[in-house]
Image (cartoon, grey):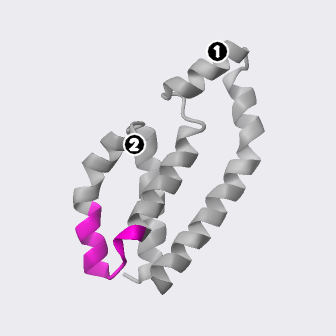
Amino acid sequence: MPKGLFGIFIYFMYFIMSFLIPSTSGLASATMAIVGPMADFVGVQKHVVVTAFQSASGIVNMITPTSGVVMGTMAISRLPYNKWIAFMAKFLGILFVVNGIIIWIAAVVG
């Protein structure tokens, strides 16, 4: 697998896994032992995997309904969840694409 494609694949994988495991430390402990050696096998440096993990997890944690911080803040501010998603959708879409490009470049160059 090409290095850039691997970086994008790991980014998408962490994006999906962040919905399933909202805890960042839990997600890291569940996946890094598998993904780290995969990165070595493909020739991608480990900092690219960590960047993909942090980027995907950070984006998902701003919108996930399983996050106590997000739901608690919305409850205190009396903001409906659907309005929060509508407000954040464009920004998170741009952030998702920019992060993907940066991860692809880091995987190819690094």
Q: Is residue 10 left or right of residue 103?
A: left
49, above or below 62, in the image: below
Q: Residue furthest front?
A: 47
Q: Which of the marked residues, 2 or 1, is nearer the chain's N terminus? A: 2
Circle 2/circle 1 CB separation < 8 Å: no
The amino acid pointed to by label 1 is Ala
Give the residue displayed 48% in from the left and 48% down from the top.
Answer: 57
In which quarter of the view is residue 34 placed? bottom left
Q: What are the residue bounds of the magenta stretch?
A: 35-47
Secondary element at tag 1: helix
46, above or below 55, in the image: below
**Circle 1 Cα neighbour tier, 10 Å, few/some/many (<14 / 14–19 / ≥20):** few
User: Between 41 and 82, which is closer to the camera in this rendering?
Assistant: 41
Q: Verify whether residue 44 appears in magenta.
A: yes
**Circle 2 Cα neighbour tier, 10 Å, few/some/many (<14 / 14–19 / ≥20):** some
Secondary element at tag 2: helix
Give the residue displayed 69% in from the left and 53% down from the top.
Answer: 93
38, above or below 61, in the image: below
Q: Verify whether residue 55 appears in magenta.
A: no
Q: Main secondary structure of the magenta part?
A: helix
- In which quadrant will I find the N terminus? bottom left
Give the residue displayed 22% in from the left and 58% down from the top.
Answer: 33
Q: Please give the label number shown on residue 16.
A: none
Residue 10 x %, y %? 41, 63
Q: Is residue 86 left or right of residue 72?
A: right
The amino acid pointed to by label 2 is Thr
* Residue pointed to by mark 1: 75
* Residue pointed to by mark 2: 24
Q: Is residue 51 left or right of residue 46?
A: right
Residue 95 x %, y %? 67, 56
